[in-house]
Image: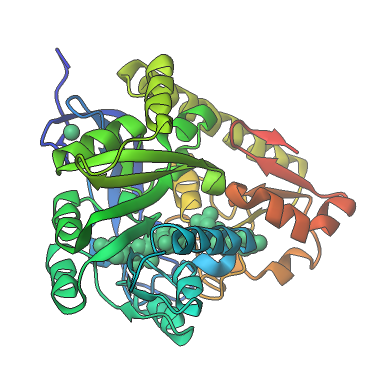
């Protein structure tokens, strides 16, 4: 962009990345701290930019993968009933389509606790999950899922191709956007995928981030924020083609992208439709992204003002869902235990620890009822229906939810 300095180099095409949002000094979003720990916390600068060549929206600084994905990684995908059903449906669809061939084979990167592959395993279909985070990989293994505790990349994928033959499907959910080394991933996919196979991945959609000002989707693990335009460019860069897109309601709005080797499949009408929709709204334009950044500042100011007013009024405010997303909210907005007394979360690995950076205590959901607070700030807003249904009694007892997506309001 004329007159502007590039702040980073695009991880896909080596183009110039121009920053449009700076979310400041941030910790690792999933590093829940022991209360008595005196270990130094890791911080980095969380800023987002857009590549002037391929439009890919990406962080300008990346965190080494071993700092994020390791034995202690606390996120368990099966923690939500809605997500369990979503992935069981995903597996059933693959079984009825791409895997309805003789001796099918599916590989998943980031299989976590086996939320998707357990359905494949029960159907008796050959599969392999790659999951570098040891504890969640062990949960998948205990459910009978075949897991390799390793990062999917060019070398590990090539080993699997050698030992087990080609895969009809390579799948990744909420994992491709975590990976700032797509060159190695695509070399691995190229080695392992059958000639007519599909590489399918689903991740939070830039279009939903902008529409909902959901800036909390930006954190260390979410290195890329994909759109149909940027994924198409990425696919082409590596010799693949974007052949289908599907909007998904989960995690605040995602897209499932289907890629095939270039020229092997006819792209669906949905691809052209979504590209046209993105063009019409100027989604990949710098003006839209700067407008998004301005909205983020407004949400921050409104949220901090509301929480300070509630504190002055003497209201009891807690939060619900110690999400990775909430690390961005609490650290960017400077929200600590003085504004939000504690966060409830159903994940044992997060409970009785402190949130990264702002050190808000995490308690089990039983603490929520004992007694109910006046207000609950919904950090897990993407699971709103499920959580509000489970916690119906809170509202009946006079409690009120606070949301900040798409704007700050008391529900
Ligand atoms: N697929 C699950 C879902 O959608 O709920 C898990 C998503 S979780 C946010 C991302 C997972 O990707 C983590 O379990 C992490 O350990 C794993 N991961 C990160 N980099 C990876 C890589 N290169 N290969 C395989 N898994 C990876
Ligand atoms: P996610 O938004 O990254 O999926 O994280 C959701 C977090 O919220 C995770 O730590 C589990 C927690 N959670 C609850 O505490 N109760 C619930 O009912 C649900 C669905 C999630
Ligand atoms: Zn680029």
Residue 68: percent from the left, percent from the top? 31, 63
Judge left or right: residue 79 versus residue 256: right
Q: Residue at x 31, y 19 (%)?
A: 286
Which residue reaches farthest top?
2
Which is nearer the eye, 138 or 172? Answer: 172
Residue 276: percent from the left, percent from the top? 39, 20
Q: Residue at x 12, y 68 (%)?
A: 155
For the question of whether residue 114 can be seen, the reply is no
Vertical order, 336 against 368 (above or below)? above
Q: Residue at x 36, y 80 (%)?
A: 146
Residue 32, located in which quarter of the rendered image?
Answer: bottom left
Which quadrant: the N terminus?
top left
Which residue reaches farthest front?
102
Judge left or right: residue 241 versus residue 202: left
Residue 346: percent from the left, percent from the top? 62, 69
Which is nearer the eye, 387 or 170? Answer: 170
Q: Quadrant of ligand 1?
A: bottom left
For the question of whether residue 264 can be seen, the reply is yes
Vertical order, 183 against 371 (above or below)? above
Vertical order, 296 against 314 (above or below)? above
Q: Looking at the image, how many numbered discs can be counted on the residues?
A: 0
Q: Residue at x 35, y 59 (%)?
A: 171
Judge left or right: residue 284 versus residue 314: left
Specify how the rendered protein is coloured.
rainbow
Residue 52: percent from the left, percent from the top? 19, 24
Which quadrant: the C terminus?
top right
């Amino acid at each position: 962009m004329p007159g502007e300095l590039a702040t980073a180099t695009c991880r896909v095409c080596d183009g110039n990345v121009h920053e449009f949002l700076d979310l400041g000094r941030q910790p690792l979003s999933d590093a829940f701290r022991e209360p008595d720990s005196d270990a130094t916390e890791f911080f980095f600068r969380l800023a987002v930019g857009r590549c002037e060549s391929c439009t890919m929206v990406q962080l300008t600084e990346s965190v080494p993968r071993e700092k994020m994905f390791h034995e202690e990684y606390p996120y368990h995908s099966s923690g939500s009933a809605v997500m369990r059903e979503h992935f069981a449906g995903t597996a059933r669809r693959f079984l009825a389509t791409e895997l309805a061939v003789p001796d099918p084979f599916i590989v998943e990167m980031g299989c976590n606790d086996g939320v998707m592959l357990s359905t494949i395993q029960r159907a008796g279909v050959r599969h392999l999950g790659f999951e570098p985070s040891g504890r969640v990989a062990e949960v998948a293994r205990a459910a009978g899922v075949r897991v390799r505790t390793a990062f999917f990349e060019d070398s590990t994928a090539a080993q699997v191709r050698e030992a087990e033959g080609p895969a009809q499907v390579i799948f990744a959910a909420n994992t491709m956007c975590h990976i700032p080394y797509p060159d190695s991933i695509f070399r691995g996919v190229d080695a392992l995928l059958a000639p007519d196979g599909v590489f399918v991945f689903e991740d939070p959609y830039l279009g939903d981030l902008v529409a909902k000002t959901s800036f909390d989707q930006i954190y260390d693990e979410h290195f890329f924020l994909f759109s149909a335009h940027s994924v198409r460019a990425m696919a082409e860069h590596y010799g693949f083609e974007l052949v289908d897109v599907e909007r998904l309601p989960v995690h605040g709005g995602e897209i499932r992208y289907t890629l095939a080797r270039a020229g092997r499949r006819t792209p669906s009408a949905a691809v052209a439709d979504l590209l046209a929709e993105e063009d019409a709204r100027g989604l990949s334009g710098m003006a839209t992204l700067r407008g998004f950044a301005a909205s983020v500042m407004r949400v921050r100011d409104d949220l901090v003002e509301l929480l300070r007013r509630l504190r002055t009024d003497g209201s009891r405010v807690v939060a619900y869902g110690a999400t990775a997303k909430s690390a961005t909210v609490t650290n960017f907005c400077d929200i600590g235990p003085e504004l939000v007394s504690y966060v409830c979360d159903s994940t044992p690995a997060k409970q009785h620890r402190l949130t990264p950076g702002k050190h808000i205590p995490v308690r089990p959901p039983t603490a929520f009822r004992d007694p109910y607070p006046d207000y609950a700030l919904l950090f897990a807003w993407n699971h709103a229906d499920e959580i509000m249904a489970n916690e119906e009694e809170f509202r009946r007892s006079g409690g009120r939810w606070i949301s900040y997506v798409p704007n700050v309001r008391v529900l």
